[in-house]
Protein backbone atom coordinates (compact mmCIF):
# COMPACT_ATOMS: atom_id res chain seq x y z
CA UNK A 1 0.00 0.00 0.00
CA UNK A 2 2.82 2.42 0.87
CA UNK A 3 4.45 1.83 -2.54
CA UNK A 4 1.14 2.58 -4.27
CA UNK A 5 0.68 5.73 -2.16
CA UNK A 6 4.19 6.95 -3.06
CA UNK A 7 3.46 6.30 -6.75
CA UNK A 8 0.22 8.27 -6.56
CA UNK A 9 1.99 11.19 -4.82
CA UNK A 10 4.70 11.17 -7.48
CA UNK A 11 2.12 11.27 -10.25
CA UNK A 12 0.33 14.15 -8.53
CA UNK A 13 3.41 16.41 -8.72
CA UNK A 14 3.10 19.26 -11.23
CA UNK A 15 4.51 18.16 -14.62
CA UNK A 16 7.47 19.95 -16.12
CA UNK A 17 6.56 22.83 -18.42
CA UNK A 18 6.15 21.53 -21.95
CA UNK A 19 7.06 23.44 -25.10
CA UNK A 20 4.02 25.34 -26.39
CA UNK A 21 3.95 23.30 -29.60
CA UNK A 22 3.88 20.04 -27.63
CA UNK A 23 1.11 21.30 -25.34
CA UNK A 24 -0.96 22.27 -28.39
CA UNK A 25 -0.29 18.90 -30.01
CA UNK A 26 -1.48 17.03 -26.92
CA UNK A 27 -4.59 19.21 -26.72
CA UNK A 28 -5.39 18.34 -30.32
CA UNK A 29 -5.04 14.61 -29.58
CA UNK A 30 -7.18 14.91 -26.44
CA UNK A 31 -9.88 16.67 -28.47
CA UNK A 32 -9.85 13.88 -31.07
CA UNK A 33 -10.09 11.28 -28.32
CA UNK A 34 -12.94 13.04 -26.54
CA UNK A 35 -14.95 13.47 -29.74
CA UNK A 36 -14.44 10.07 -31.31
CA UNK A 37 -13.79 7.53 -28.54
CA UNK A 38 -16.22 7.99 -25.68
CA UNK A 39 -15.52 4.69 -23.93
CA UNK A 40 -11.76 5.11 -24.31
CA UNK A 41 -11.89 8.74 -23.17
CA UNK A 42 -13.98 7.73 -20.17
CA UNK A 43 -11.20 5.44 -18.99
CA UNK A 44 -8.18 7.64 -19.62
CA UNK A 45 -9.66 10.61 -17.73
CA UNK A 46 -8.73 8.63 -14.59
CA UNK A 47 -5.02 8.92 -15.43
CA UNK A 48 -2.54 11.62 -14.36
CA UNK A 49 -1.89 14.20 -17.07
CA UNK A 50 1.32 12.76 -18.63
CA UNK A 51 -0.21 9.31 -19.06
CA UNK A 52 -3.52 10.75 -20.26
CA UNK A 53 -1.69 12.82 -22.86
CA UNK A 54 0.34 9.83 -24.05
CA UNK A 55 -2.76 7.66 -24.34
CA UNK A 56 -4.51 10.40 -26.32
CA UNK A 57 -1.55 10.57 -28.70
CA UNK A 58 -1.69 6.81 -29.19
CA UNK A 59 -5.42 6.96 -29.82
CA UNK A 60 -5.15 9.83 -32.31
CA UNK A 61 -2.52 7.98 -34.35
CA UNK A 62 -4.51 4.74 -34.19
CA UNK A 63 -7.67 6.56 -35.18
CA UNK A 64 -5.92 7.96 -38.24
CA UNK A 65 -4.99 4.43 -39.30
CA UNK A 66 -8.53 3.15 -38.70
CA UNK A 67 -10.09 6.07 -40.59
CA UNK A 68 -8.00 5.27 -43.65
CA UNK A 69 -9.21 1.68 -43.55
CA UNK A 70 -12.85 2.67 -43.01
CA UNK A 71 -12.88 5.54 -45.50
CA UNK A 72 -14.28 5.65 -49.00
CA UNK A 73 -11.04 5.70 -50.99
CA UNK A 74 -10.31 2.93 -53.52
CA UNK A 75 -8.31 -0.01 -52.19
CA UNK A 76 -5.06 1.05 -53.87
CA UNK A 77 -5.31 4.56 -52.44
CA UNK A 78 -5.96 3.19 -48.96
CA UNK A 79 -2.92 0.96 -49.19
CA UNK A 80 -0.79 3.93 -50.29
CA UNK A 81 -2.09 6.11 -47.43
CA UNK A 82 -1.38 3.34 -44.92
CA UNK A 83 2.17 2.94 -46.18
CA UNK A 84 2.65 6.73 -45.95
CA UNK A 85 1.45 6.51 -42.36
CA UNK A 86 3.96 3.74 -41.76
CA UNK A 87 6.69 6.03 -43.10
CA UNK A 88 5.57 8.71 -40.63
CA UNK A 89 5.79 6.12 -37.85
CA UNK A 90 9.35 5.33 -38.93
CA UNK A 91 10.20 9.03 -38.58
CA UNK A 92 8.67 9.07 -35.10
CA UNK A 93 10.70 6.00 -34.11
CA UNK A 94 13.91 7.63 -35.31
CA UNK A 95 13.16 10.85 -33.37
CA UNK A 96 13.06 12.81 -36.64
CA UNK A 97 9.99 14.87 -35.66
CA UNK A 98 10.66 18.46 -34.55
CA UNK A 99 8.37 20.22 -32.07
CA UNK A 100 7.30 22.69 -34.77
CA UNK A 101 6.26 19.94 -37.20
CA UNK A 102 2.87 20.68 -38.75
CA UNK A 103 1.42 17.28 -37.77
CA UNK A 104 0.21 17.53 -34.14
CA UNK A 105 -0.30 13.77 -33.81
CA UNK A 106 3.30 13.11 -34.81
CA UNK A 107 4.55 15.77 -32.39
CA UNK A 108 2.50 14.40 -29.49
CA UNK A 109 3.39 10.76 -30.12
CA UNK A 110 7.08 11.61 -30.55
CA UNK A 111 7.07 13.44 -27.20
CA UNK A 112 5.15 10.62 -25.48
CA UNK A 113 7.72 8.12 -26.73
CA UNK A 114 10.40 10.13 -24.95
CA UNK A 115 8.42 9.99 -21.71
CA UNK A 116 7.39 6.33 -21.71
CA UNK A 117 8.65 2.99 -22.98
CA UNK A 118 6.06 2.69 -25.74
CA UNK A 119 6.65 -0.30 -28.08
CA UNK A 120 5.99 1.59 -31.31
CA UNK A 121 6.45 -1.56 -33.39
CA UNK A 122 2.94 -2.46 -32.21
CA UNK A 123 1.63 0.43 -34.32
CA UNK A 124 3.17 -1.32 -37.32
CA UNK A 125 1.03 -4.31 -36.34
CA UNK A 126 -2.04 -2.07 -36.25
CA UNK A 127 -1.29 -0.93 -39.79
CA UNK A 128 -0.87 -4.58 -40.82
CA UNK A 129 -4.28 -5.38 -39.32
CA UNK A 130 -6.02 -2.54 -41.15
CA UNK A 131 -4.35 -3.68 -44.38
CA UNK A 132 -5.98 -7.07 -43.77
CA UNK A 133 -9.33 -5.24 -43.71
CA UNK A 134 -8.53 -3.28 -46.85
CA UNK A 135 -7.61 -6.47 -48.69
CA UNK A 136 -10.87 -8.12 -47.62
CA UNK A 137 -9.42 -10.84 -45.39
CA UNK A 138 -11.83 -13.42 -44.00
CA UNK A 139 -11.26 -15.82 -41.13
CA UNK A 140 -11.93 -19.54 -41.23
CA UNK A 141 -11.09 -20.33 -37.61
CA UNK A 142 -10.67 -18.56 -34.27
CA UNK A 143 -6.91 -18.97 -34.61
CA UNK A 144 -7.13 -17.04 -37.90
CA UNK A 145 -9.24 -14.29 -36.32
CA UNK A 146 -6.84 -14.03 -33.37
CA UNK A 147 -4.08 -12.91 -35.73
CA UNK A 148 -6.23 -9.99 -36.84
CA UNK A 149 -7.43 -9.18 -33.31
CA UNK A 150 -3.85 -9.15 -32.01
CA UNK A 151 -2.93 -6.63 -34.70
CA UNK A 152 -5.80 -4.20 -34.20
CA UNK A 153 -6.51 -4.61 -30.46
CA UNK A 154 -3.86 -6.70 -28.73
CA UNK A 155 -1.31 -4.23 -30.06
CA UNK A 156 -3.23 -1.38 -28.41
CA UNK A 157 -3.12 -3.28 -25.13
CA UNK A 158 0.65 -3.64 -25.36
CA UNK A 159 1.08 0.02 -26.33
CA UNK A 160 -1.04 1.07 -23.36
CA UNK A 161 1.03 -1.08 -21.03
CA UNK A 162 4.08 0.85 -22.23
CA UNK A 163 2.44 3.99 -20.84
CA UNK A 164 1.10 2.40 -17.66
CA UNK A 165 4.18 0.42 -16.65
CA UNK A 166 4.00 -2.11 -13.80
CA UNK A 167 4.44 -1.57 -10.07
CA UNK A 168 7.69 -2.78 -8.46
CA UNK A 169 7.35 -6.18 -6.82
CA UNK A 170 4.12 -7.15 -8.56
CA UNK A 171 3.71 -10.88 -9.18
CA UNK A 172 3.97 -12.39 -12.65
CA UNK A 173 5.06 -9.15 -14.37
CA UNK A 174 6.93 -11.02 -17.17
CA UNK A 175 3.45 -11.98 -18.42
CA UNK A 176 2.06 -8.43 -18.25
CA UNK A 177 2.37 -7.91 -22.00
CA UNK A 178 0.61 -11.22 -22.66
CA UNK A 179 -2.28 -10.24 -20.36
CA UNK A 180 -2.55 -6.79 -21.99
CA UNK A 181 -2.69 -8.45 -25.39
CA UNK A 182 -5.38 -10.90 -24.22
CA UNK A 183 -7.50 -8.11 -22.77
CA UNK A 184 -7.29 -6.38 -26.16
CA UNK A 185 -8.60 -9.55 -27.79
CA UNK A 186 -11.53 -9.62 -25.34
CA UNK A 187 -12.47 -6.03 -26.19
CA UNK A 188 -12.16 -6.65 -29.92
CA UNK A 189 -14.32 -9.77 -29.88
CA UNK A 190 -16.94 -7.78 -27.95
CA UNK A 191 -16.72 -5.08 -30.63
CA UNK A 192 -17.18 -7.68 -33.35
CA UNK A 193 -20.34 -9.02 -31.68
CA UNK A 194 -21.73 -5.52 -31.08
CA UNK A 195 -21.10 -4.41 -34.69
CA UNK A 196 -22.02 -7.64 -36.46
CA UNK A 197 -24.85 -6.13 -38.52
CA UNK A 198 -23.06 -2.83 -39.24
CA UNK A 199 -20.01 -4.75 -40.46
CA UNK A 200 -22.17 -7.06 -42.59
CA UNK A 201 -23.82 -4.07 -44.27
CA UNK A 202 -20.33 -2.78 -45.05
CA UNK A 203 -19.40 -6.11 -46.65
CA UNK A 204 -17.27 -7.36 -43.75
CA UNK A 205 -17.55 -10.57 -41.78
CA UNK A 206 -15.21 -11.11 -38.85
CA UNK A 207 -16.66 -14.08 -36.97
CA UNK A 208 -14.93 -17.31 -37.99
CA UNK A 209 -16.54 -19.12 -40.93
CA UNK A 210 -16.51 -22.42 -39.07
CA UNK A 211 -18.53 -20.86 -36.23
CA UNK A 212 -21.04 -19.34 -38.63
CA UNK A 213 -21.52 -22.67 -40.37
CA UNK A 214 -21.80 -24.56 -37.08
CA UNK A 215 -24.78 -22.42 -36.05
CA UNK A 216 -26.37 -22.11 -39.48
CA UNK A 217 -25.49 -18.42 -39.83
CA UNK A 218 -23.32 -18.51 -42.95
CA UNK A 219 -25.87 -16.39 -44.85
CA UNK A 220 -24.86 -13.31 -42.86
CA UNK A 221 -26.60 -10.58 -40.84
CA UNK A 222 -27.85 -7.80 -43.09
CA UNK A 223 -31.40 -7.60 -41.66
CA UNK A 224 -33.03 -7.31 -38.24
CA UNK A 225 -34.34 -10.87 -38.53
CA UNK A 226 -32.38 -14.10 -38.24
CA UNK A 227 -32.38 -16.35 -41.35
CA UNK A 228 -34.72 -19.34 -41.06
CA UNK A 229 -33.04 -22.29 -39.34
CA UNK A 230 -30.15 -20.21 -38.00
CA UNK A 231 -29.25 -20.50 -34.31
CA UNK A 232 -28.10 -16.92 -33.89
CA UNK A 233 -28.58 -17.05 -30.12
CA UNK A 234 -26.38 -20.13 -29.93
CA UNK A 235 -23.69 -18.42 -32.01
CA UNK A 236 -23.69 -15.31 -29.82
CA UNK A 237 -23.56 -17.30 -26.58
CA UNK A 238 -20.68 -19.37 -27.99
CA UNK A 239 -18.67 -16.23 -28.79
CA UNK A 240 -19.64 -14.61 -25.46
CA UNK A 241 -18.16 -17.56 -23.58
CA UNK A 242 -14.96 -17.16 -25.57
CA UNK A 243 -14.82 -13.44 -24.83
CA UNK A 244 -15.49 -13.98 -21.12
CA UNK A 245 -12.59 -16.42 -20.93
CA UNK A 246 -10.36 -13.80 -22.56
CA UNK A 247 -11.53 -11.15 -20.08
CA UNK A 248 -10.83 -13.46 -17.14
CA UNK A 249 -7.28 -14.06 -18.37
CA UNK A 250 -6.62 -10.44 -19.33
CA UNK A 251 -7.88 -9.08 -16.00
CA UNK A 252 -4.84 -10.69 -14.39
CA UNK A 253 -3.00 -7.57 -15.55
CA UNK A 254 -4.85 -5.34 -13.06
CA UNK A 255 -2.87 -6.13 -9.87
CA UNK A 256 0.35 -5.30 -11.74
CA UNK A 257 -0.67 -1.68 -12.35
CA UNK A 258 -0.60 1.38 -10.12
CA UNK A 259 -3.94 2.52 -8.74
CA UNK A 260 -4.87 5.03 -11.42
CA UNK A 261 -3.58 2.98 -14.36
CA UNK A 262 -5.46 -0.01 -12.98
CA UNK A 263 -8.59 2.14 -12.66
CA UNK A 264 -8.25 3.22 -16.29
CA UNK A 265 -7.96 -0.37 -17.52
CA UNK A 266 -10.74 -1.59 -15.22
CA UNK A 267 -13.03 1.18 -16.46
CA UNK A 268 -12.44 0.57 -20.17
CA UNK A 269 -12.56 -3.21 -19.86
CA UNK A 270 -15.48 -3.04 -17.45
CA UNK A 271 -17.58 -1.04 -19.90
CA UNK A 272 -17.00 -3.64 -22.60
CA UNK A 273 -17.61 -6.51 -20.20
CA UNK A 274 -20.99 -5.01 -19.34
CA UNK A 275 -21.73 -4.58 -23.04
CA UNK A 276 -20.97 -8.27 -23.42
CA UNK A 277 -23.43 -9.09 -20.63
CA UNK A 278 -26.13 -7.06 -22.39
CA UNK A 279 -25.46 -8.85 -25.66
CA UNK A 280 -25.64 -12.23 -23.91
CA UNK A 281 -28.98 -11.29 -22.32
CA UNK A 282 -30.51 -10.25 -25.66
CA UNK A 283 -28.47 -11.53 -28.63
CA UNK A 284 -30.91 -10.19 -31.23
CA UNK A 285 -30.30 -6.64 -29.97
CA UNK A 286 -27.13 -6.43 -32.06
CA UNK A 287 -29.25 -6.93 -35.18
CA UNK A 288 -31.59 -4.08 -34.22
CA UNK A 289 -28.91 -1.48 -33.50
CA UNK A 290 -25.77 -0.67 -31.56
CA UNK A 291 -25.81 -1.84 -27.94
CA UNK A 292 -24.46 0.77 -25.53
CA UNK A 293 -24.30 1.59 -21.82
CA UNK A 294 -26.02 4.60 -20.20
CA UNK A 295 -23.81 7.16 -18.51
CA UNK A 296 -24.66 6.11 -14.97
CA UNK A 297 -23.43 2.56 -15.64
CA UNK A 298 -20.16 3.89 -17.04
CA UNK A 299 -19.77 6.06 -13.96
CA UNK A 300 -20.31 3.05 -11.71
CA UNK A 301 -17.66 1.08 -13.59
CA UNK A 302 -15.21 3.97 -13.26
CA UNK A 303 -15.78 4.34 -9.51
CA UNK A 304 -15.43 0.61 -9.03
CA UNK A 305 -12.13 0.65 -10.92
CA UNK A 306 -10.80 3.66 -9.05
CA UNK A 307 -11.60 1.99 -5.74
CA UNK A 308 -9.30 -0.90 -6.71
CA UNK A 309 -12.12 -3.41 -6.25
CA UNK A 310 -11.46 -5.22 -9.52
CA UNK A 311 -7.71 -5.46 -8.92
CA UNK A 312 -8.27 -6.85 -5.42
CA UNK A 313 -10.80 -9.35 -6.73
CA UNK A 314 -8.37 -10.60 -9.37
CA UNK A 315 -5.58 -10.84 -6.76
CA UNK A 316 -7.77 -13.00 -4.52
CA UNK A 317 -8.80 -15.24 -7.39
CA UNK A 318 -5.19 -15.63 -8.51
CA UNK A 319 -4.08 -16.47 -4.96
CA UNK A 320 -6.77 -19.15 -4.68
CA UNK A 321 -5.70 -20.72 -7.96
CA UNK A 322 -2.06 -20.71 -6.84
CA UNK A 323 -2.81 -22.22 -3.41
Image (tube, helix red, strand yellow):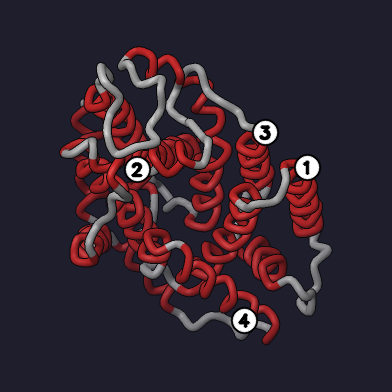
Q: Residues within 10 Å of mark 1 (few under 14, many from 20)?
A: few
Determine which residue is flagged by label 2. 194
Residue 76, numbered label: 1
Query: Mark 3 to mark 4: distance in Å?
Result: 37 Å
Q: Secondary structure at mark 4?
A: helix
- In depth, the one of 27 and 99 nearer the eye is 27
Distance of label 2 from label 4 (alpha carbons) = 36 Å
Q: Is residue 49 above or below residue 152?
A: below
Q: Earlier in the sequence, mark 3 or mark 1?
A: 1
How far apart are labels 3 and 1 at the CA level?
Answer: 9 Å
Q: Which residue is labeled 3 in the image?
A: 135
| Nearer to us: label 4 or label 1 | 1
Instruction: Assess whether mark 1 and mark 2 are in contact (beta carbons under 8 angstroms).
Output: no
Q: Counting other residues with Cα less than 10 Å from the Cα at mark 2, is it few (<14), some (14-19), or many (20 or more)?
A: many
Q: Are marks 3 and 4 in contact (CB under 8 Å)?
A: no
Disc 2 versus disc 1: distance between alpha carbons? 29 Å
Closer to the chain start, of discs 2 and 4, is 4
Count residues near mark 4 (Cα–Cα under 10 Å), then give few for <14, some for 14-19, many for 20+. Answer: some
Q: CA distance from mark 4 to mark 1?
A: 36 Å
Q: Earlier in the sequence, mark 3 or mark 4?
A: 4
For disc 4, the marked residue is 23
Q: Which of disc 1 and disc 2 is earlier in sequence?
A: 1
Looking at the image, residue 204 sits to the left or right of residue 98; the answer is left
Amino acid sequence: MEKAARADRAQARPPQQLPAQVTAAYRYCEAVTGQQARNFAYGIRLLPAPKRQAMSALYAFSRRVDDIGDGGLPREAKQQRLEETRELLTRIKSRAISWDDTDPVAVALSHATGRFRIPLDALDELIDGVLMDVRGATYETWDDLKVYCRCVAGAIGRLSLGVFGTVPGARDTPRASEYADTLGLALQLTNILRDVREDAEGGRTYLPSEDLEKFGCAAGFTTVTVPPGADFTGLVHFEVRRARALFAEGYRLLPMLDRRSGACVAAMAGIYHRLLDRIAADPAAVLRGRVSLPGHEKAYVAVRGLSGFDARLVSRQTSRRSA
